[in-house]
Image (cartoon, rainbow, N blue to C red):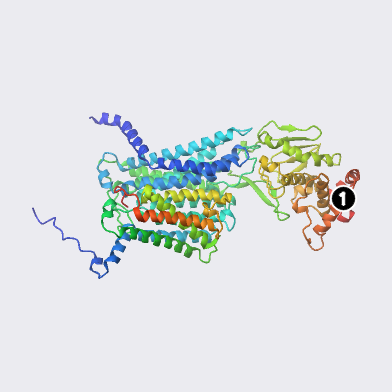
Amino acid sequence: MTALAARALAPASAGRLLRLEIRRNAMVWALPLLAVLFVYDPYRTASGYPPVWDVRASVILNHMLFDFGAFAGGLAAWAGSRDGRRQTRDLLAATARPAWARQAAALAGTLFWVLLGFLAAVAVLYIQTARQVTWGGPPLWPVAVGAVALITICAIGFTAGALVPGRFTAPLVAVGVVVLDLVGFREALGPSSAYALLSPSAGALPDDTGLFYPVAPDVAIAQVMFMGGITAAVLGILALSPALRWPGTLRWPGTLRWPGTWRLPAGATGPWLPAVAITVVAAGLAAAGTAAGLAGTARPVVSGWEFPAPVGTPKPVVSGWEIPALHNAASDRPLAYPPDCTGTSFQVCVHPAFSFFRDDVAAALDPVAAEVAGLPGAPLSAEEAAARGKGALLGGVITGIPPVYEFNGERAGSLIGAFQGTTASASSATWRALFQQAFLDALVAGPAHAGSPGPASPAQQAVVTALLTAVGSQVPQSHQAAGGGPPGEPSPAQIAAAANRFAALPSAARHAWLAAHLPALRAGQVTLAQLP
Amino acid sequence: MTAAGWQDPPAAPVLAAWPVPAGVRLVWLHLLSRRVPAAAVALVGCGAVLRAALQWHWTFSSGPYAQRIPLIIEAGAAAAAVVTSHSPFGEAERATGRWLPWLRLGTALALTGLAIGALQLGVTGAGLNEGIMVLARNVIGMTGIGLLCSLVTGGLLAWILPLAYMAFAQYALLEAWRSPWTWPARPPADRGAWLCACVVFAVGLAAFTISGARNSLADNA
């Protein structure tokens, strides 16, 4: 066979080698196990989330990566340690293929099954989501980040297996991967520094993520760059490793032996390999370092404030992160959508993605809207809006002329209950009462309360409680009498007594008093004793 | 033929010169062949990682999330213990005498105890959520799962099922499942959870003692 003919056959033989590796790879036997884990963990978890694309897609990085990562890392280490484990390096050193080509084929075989399983699971998740959502399209960045993360995990595991082909390598790599994943998740929930953003795990997303504004891909780009850089560096180290290209082993304990030579087996590789590998390592480290530097410049996007129950220091709700160097101003432009409205005298509009709970919102707001109709500043309609950038309470605000009550479907925190955007939670009496309370708080406590987060005055609390009682809702716990209050302030019992007194008034008298005194009440100039 | 390539025969191992009982030597050789010293180092490492997780607050201090990282490390300890079930000698070893099942039994029991001890040592004074009882129960149960797995996959891949169970139990933890078979999610004194974990361990230990891990001479490590 001439050299030309041999070169022409090279791709075919490489393909044959890859097919062999795919067929013999151990990862294929883990796929049924992963399928069971997928159904029990990411699939069921996603089913409990509201049918919003970005929210459901968050399980890819928060749940699916955990399950797949453990087996991808462990079985990649298993594949990488094969030659060392079977002590066939001496034998294979005499074959025509260089070590890096053989190892690349084995790694590709593992990656094939890992990515196939991962993408199949994503497809199942997205098909299920597509059947339920009423607006938007599937986000692709979580899939890209997840795929790159799995490639990185496989590369690290494989290299660890190739360098230390012991029996403990595979399980320890698998455990190390999931520990790192959870540490990253812990950081993602409450980042102690912007560098925590490099972890592919994401914190709990607001329920309206991606509905009013596009999700900026800044952090995803930095993550892909970081993990891609690590992958390149690890693969460069794999190619450089003398243990792969010299018939020696690194085993521990007992026989720690390192060949200590960088000489290539004659004819197996070209002299270009070390240079290319070193370049790849350097480029990978540079990319990872650049990504870390970019992540260090990230700044949080504060979407609103929430109160710990019953009162306390408001804390910002971070709905995302921006990296100035990667940020596209187009991500800040609101998305256009046709609102889904209902009602005539008091119209309630929601985002089409939340059409499924439009009627629940209307059922909650209609009684209280009727109770306060005609009062100065009382809203004539309600509209779902993003709290992003407003710095307002998540409970909602009354804005514009004519007044419109703006609420949002984001994570509502303790202010309006554990609303999760699902029909089950929206239909509960507690959620309804808390949603009504948020509406009345916005009206009675006024813009001062919404603009600068803080507890309502005792008189405002009593009026809200009385109006809730008047419409037949259960009074929220934060407005119920619960022992003594702070010194000098009316106690919860006194507030409750005033609320009962006000609620006992005839509806017309209550309405007339509110019509006359609502501006003063909203300004905090009415005391508890002044309530009729 | 010349004497140029001639070398002296290798010296006999020093251990052979010691006046040690044959039984002790047999046990020591068995432990060495299973890489038990390395497993002990790995278990101590697991204890150190658990200590670091608690010391530097990698994990949550309370709630269902608090058990997640300890559970992973407990699964790692169980995995390190069960991969020692692999024998590098294959079928030939089974014909060597009647002591092999007892050696298997003793090794598995000793490593399970060592795993619990190493992890307990790691958390001493650090305030592990749910305490030593849940830690011990998790290690016992997952070691049993690993020993059962070794009968099918062989010792070197016996870590797969304990890790799969750990991943499954993570979901059970977050969802607060009440089934005793999801023992990591149950309170320390839950009798059903203890029963399930101990039954799995007992069945796995008995099966492993009698038949040993599935063996393949191709995988020597």
Q: Which residue is mark 1?
A: A502
In the depicted structure, whether residue A434 falls above or below residue A135 = below
Chain letter for the residue marked with disc 1 in the picture: A
Residue B19 can be seen in this image: yes
Q: Position of residue A182 (x, y in %)?
A: 52, 51
Quadrant into which the N terminus of chain A falls: top left
Q: Position of residue A209 (x, y in %)?
A: 63, 40
**Amino acid identity at mark 1:** Phe
Residue A222 can be seen in this image: no
| Along the viewing direction, whichever of A409 and B21 lies nearer the viewer | B21
Crowding around mark 1 (Cα neighbors within 10 Å: few <14, some 14 to 19, many 20+) is many
Q: Position of residue A190 (x, y in %)?
A: 60, 52
Image position of A170 (left or right of B219): right
> On the image, which quarter does residue A345 sit in?
top right
In the depicted structure, whether residue A213 falls above or below residue B119 = above
Determine the secondary structure under disc 1: helix
